[in-house]
Each structure stands twice: as C-alpha cells, then as structure tokens.
Image (cartoon, helix red, strand yellow):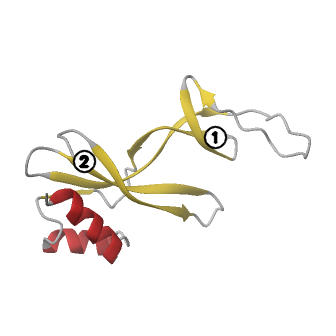
Amino acid sequence: MKTGETKVIDQREQGSMGGGCWQEFLVLEKLNDTEFLLDIRRWDYIGEVGDLEEDKDGEPIMPEEIDGKLVAYVDDGFAYGGDLVKSGGEEGEVKLTRPDQGEIIRWLKDVRWHDEDVIKTLTEECIP
C-alpha cells in the first residue's frame, strides 16, 4: 500500500431493531511508512429518491447515479453510495504498526470483527 491509500479489509451487513439495514466496511488506511489507521466506514448519504419507476415485474428501478455519485443501495427512500465515510459510531478508530498488537486485537473484539481471516489480511497488508 502507498501512503494515503485505503483498502477494504472486510465487510458485513448490519441491521437495526427498526428494520433498516446497511453495510459496514472495515477499512485500513496507510498513514506513513510505519503507521496504519483501522476504522469502520459506511456508504455516504447521497440523496433522497422519490417514487421509483417500476420494471415490467413491478420491481423498483434504482437510479445508477445521483449527482455523479454511484448509488450502492436505497433504503426507505434514501440513497447511499459514492464514497465510504467513517461511521461516526462509538467504535472509533485505532492506529497500528503491527496487526498483532494487543490493542488492535482488543479493538477488533470490541467491534465484533475479530477473526483469523481479518488478522491474516491485516498482517499481509501491514508487514511487507
């Protein structure tokens, strides 16, 4: 990875009691030659979608773009896509130099994203 570059390490679908659902992405960003930032991101809100046209089977036709940004999904009339943005939740972010640091393992467990595949991918990206 180059400095300033980001990479999606893993993704998952999340839901709420109210019935909404969204995708979350575990993202690694290279800060400099030795430091990385690990955080959780989501698709950015890019606009509202009014009444959608339907195809011949009665399924709504999703717009491909809004204001030049690709639409990833529409939920309850709201469109999300474009760039991945920090989720702004309680999980925060963590800086690391090595993925086997105790602090990183604890953070991954706290955000329920600790598994062997994630650690393996982080190791491949952080340790050349």
Q: Which residue is mark 2?
A: 29
- Residue 72 point in image, percent of width and height: 58, 43
Q: Secondary structure at mark 1?
A: strand
Q: Are marks 1 and 2 in contact (CB under 8 Å)?
A: no
- Residue 6 visible in the shown view: yes
Quadrant for the C terminus in the image: bottom left
Q: At 17% across and 52% down in the image, what residue appears?
A: 36
- Residue 81 point in image, percent of width and height: 53, 39
**Which mark sits nearer the N-terminus, 1 or 2?**
2
Residue 78 is labelled as 1
In front of the other: 64 or 1: 1
Compared to residue 43, the image places residue 95 above or below, namely: below
- Residue 32 point in image, percent of width and height: 11, 44
Pointer 1 local density, CA inside 10 Å: few below 14, some 14–19, many at least 20: few
Q: At 16% across and 70% down in the image, what residue appears?
A: 103
Compared to residue 7, the image places residue 44 above or below, namely: above
How far separated are the C-alphas under marks 1 and 2? 28 Å
- Residue 114 visible in the shown view: no
Compared to residue 82, the image places residue 87 above or below, namely: below
- Residue 67 point in image, percent of width and height: 57, 22
With 4 as the anchor, is 116 left or right in this view? right
Q: Secondary structure at mark 2?
A: strand
Q: At 57% across and 63% down in the image, what residue appears?
A: 15
With 47 as the anchor, is 127 left or right in this view? left
In front of the other: 122 or 74: 122
Q: Residue furthest top?
A: 67
Instruction: Single out the mark in the foreground, 1 or 2.
Output: 2
- The answer to which image quadrant residue 90 occupies is bottom left
Q: Amino acid at mark 2?
A: Glu
Q: Amino acid at mark 1?
A: Phe
With 46 as the anchor, is 29 left or right in this view? left
Q: At 14% across and 61% down in the image, what residue appears?
A: 127
